[in-house]
Amino acid sequence: MDEISSLMREALACLEAGESGRAEEAYAAAVEVAARQLGDGHPATAALLGHLARACLEQPGKEAFAVSLLERQV
C-alpha cells in the first residue's frame, strides 16, 4: 500500500500544479499496482479508477477514455 499511497500523493501534487498528464501517469501506475496487489474488484482499485478518470477529464480529447474508466470502475 505504500507504493499506491506514494503514487496517489504524486498524482495529487501534479493535479494541483496543473499537470494533468503527469497526474494521469501516476494514477495509472497506482491502478496497476492496486489491481496486482488487491485485485480488480477491490474498492481501492475502483476508487483509483475514478481518480484516473478525473485526471483524464481535465485533458482535451480524453473524454471517451475517461468514460471507459468510469464504466470499469462500476
Image: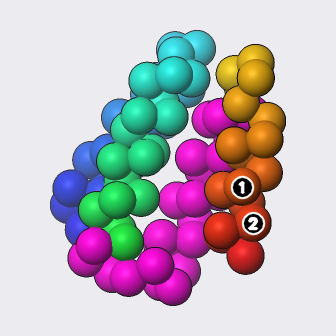
Can residue 17 be seen here? The reply is yes
How far apart, in angstroms, are the residues tagged by discs 1 and 2?
5 Å
Q: How is the image coloured?
A: rainbow
In depth, the one of 67 and 14 nearer the eye is 67
Element carrying mark 2: helix
**Quarter of the N terminus within the rendering:** bottom left
Picture coordinates of residue 39, whole percent (x, y)? 38, 82
Magenta stretch holds residue 48: yes
Q: Which residues are magenta?
A: 36-57
Picture coordinates of residue 67, whole percent (x, y)? 78, 51
Q: Amino acid at mark 2?
A: Glu
Which quarter of the figure has residue 10?
Answer: top left
Q: Name the residue beneath numbered marker 2.
A: 71
Residue displayed at 72% across by 45% down: 66
Q: Is residue 26 above or below residue 2?
A: above
Assign the magenta stretch its main secondary structure.
helix
Mark number for residue 68?
A: 1
Q: Amino acid at mark 1?
A: Ser
Q: Is residue 6 above or below residue 50?
A: above
Can residue 9 be seen here? The reply is no
Residue displayed at 71% across by 30% down: 62
Magenta stretch holds residue 16: no
Picture coordinates of residue 7, whole percent (x, y)? 32, 45
Q: Is residue 60 above or below residue 57?
A: above
Picture coordinates of residue 16, whole percent (x, y)? 55, 22
Mark number for residue 25?
A: none
Element carrying mark 1: helix
Mark 1 touches mark 2? (CB < 8 Å): yes
